[in-house]
Structures are given as structure tokens and as C-alpha cells.
């Protein structure tokens, strides 16, 4: 089945306002501290680029990236996750914030949190732009959430369907293409 972009779920203005609020909250919570912000490739890249610039300079921010893939097809998470690209730097005794585009079943983040906790960070928090709570399977608490959304497949602002539409400036739902 092929898909096409449907309506706008969250427009650019709402995204920008919410990212600014998240940045403020993180700036307060980590005031005067060092913070390693870890982006999960590739969906979180655009959100993370905006988020780190919304964190005030009272926080000493550095960035690192990890790439994971879930076995299974592109619209479902299997819970079996493989690290394709690991972090470049140690997180031992560091304050760490994982930045994700969307939490769906929560299986990916729950695996990743377990793996990263074994590296003994001082603290580990999670920030996700979107949260599809209805679909949660794994018990994972997300410390900073941009928007709760219904059970729809969404694209744009970094999120893709089969690598397409990451560059859209707003978050949209997708729908099956109706054959002529
Ligand atoms: P989880 O393990 O089920 O929580 O899956 C999380 C990952 O699935 C996200 O990082 C996305 O890569 C992908 N994903 C889940 N829902 C969507 C969606 O609506 N649009 C795009 N990617 C999604």
C-alpha cells in the first residue's frame, strides 16, 4: 500500500512554541550543570537541533548521537533493537538527556534506557516530541513530552515514512493513497 501526506496535525507555530517551553523547562532543571543530549538517529535530528538552541547557556550542553533499528517492518516496532551506531563518548557519571521523535509502544526506548543505564550515567532523562500513549506496551516514563497524539502514523519535522517527508515543517498524518 502507498501512502500520502494528509492533514496538518501540529503546525510550525505550535511546534516552535512547545519546543521553546521544553527548552525553558530543561534549562531550569539542569541549571549550572553539564548535560549530554543524545539524539536518536534519524527521526530526532530536527527536533534536537531546535531543542538545544532553546536551552539557555546556563546549561553546558554537548551532543552525541545513537542509531538504533528495530527488527520488523517500518511501521511497527518489534521490541528487538540493534545499535547501528553507538555513542562517541562515555556517559559515565554524566547527566544525560535522550531525545526521541516519538514514543509509540515504548519498546525502543525501554531497551535503550536499559543499555545506557548499564554505562552508569549520573542521571538519565527522556524527552520526546510526540507521545502515542494509547499504543504503549513497555512501561517507560517520559520526562519531557512535546505533544500527546492519537494513534495515527505521522510524518514531518524529522519523522518519516520509509525515509520520506522528514523535511516537512509541520507534523502531518498520512493516509493510504486512493487508486484512481
Ligand atoms: P516504539 O519502539 O514502538 O516506541 O517506536 C518508536 C519508533 O518508531 C520511533 O522512534 C519512530 O522511529 C517509529 N515510529 C513510531 N510511530 C511513528 C510515526 O507515527 N511516524 C514515524 N515514525 C514512527
Image (tube, grey):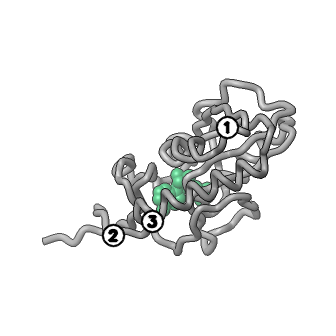
Residue 150 image position (x, y, % from top left): 52, 75
Question: Horizontally, is 93 left or right of 43 in the view?
Answer: right
Quarter placement of the C terminus: bottom left
**Disc 2 within 8 angstroms of ligand 1 (CB):** no
Q: Secondary structure at mark 1?
A: loop
In the rendered image, residue 141, in percent from the top left (x then y), is placed at 75, 61
| Cα distance in 3D space between marks 3 and 2 | 8 Å
Residue shown at 54% from the left, 40% from the top: 41
Residue that numbered label 2 is attached to: 175
Q: Residue at x 73, y 39 (%)?
A: 58
180 left or right, relative to 109? left
Of the pair 137 and 38, the residue shown nearer to us: 38
Q: Are marks 3 and 2 in contact (CB under 8 Å)?
A: no
Which residue in the structure is indicated by mark 1?
57
Name the image quarter holding residue 144: bottom right
Question: What's the distance in space between the residues labelled 2 and 1, CA to CA?
Answer: 41 Å
Q: Is 13 drawn above or below residue 37 in the view shown?
A: below
Amino acid at each position: 500500500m502507498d501512502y500520502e501526506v494528509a492533514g496538518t496535525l501540529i503546525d510550525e507555530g505550535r511546534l516552535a512554541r512547545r519546543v521553546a517551553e521544553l527548552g525553558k523547562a530543561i534549562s531550569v532543571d539542569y541549571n549550572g550543570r553539564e548535560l549530554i543530549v543524545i539524539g536518536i538517529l534519524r527521526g530526532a535530528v530536527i527536533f534536537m537541533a531546535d531543542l538545544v538552541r532553546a536551552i539557555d547557556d546556563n546549561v553546558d550542553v554537548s551532543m552525541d548521537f545513537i542509531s538504533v533499528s528495530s527488527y520488523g517492518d517500518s511501521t511497527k516496532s518489534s521490541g528487538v533493537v540493534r545499535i547501528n551506531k553507538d555513542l562517541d563518548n562515555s556517559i559515565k557519571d554524566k547527566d544525560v538527556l535522550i531525545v526521541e521523535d516519538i514514543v509509540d509502544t515504548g519498546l525502543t526506548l525501554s531497551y535503550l534506557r536499559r543499555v545506557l543505564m548499564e554505562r552508569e550515567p549520573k542521571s538519565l532523562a527522556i524527552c520526546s516530541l510526540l507521545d502515542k500513549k494509547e499504543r504503549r506496551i513497555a512501561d517507560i516514563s517520559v520526562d519531557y513530552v512535546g505533544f500527546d497524539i492519537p494513534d495515527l502514523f505521522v510524518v514531518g519535522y524529522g519523522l518519516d515514512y520509509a525515509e520520506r517527508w522528514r523535511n516537512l515543517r509541520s507534523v502531518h498524518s498520512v493516509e493510504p493513497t486512493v487508486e484512481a
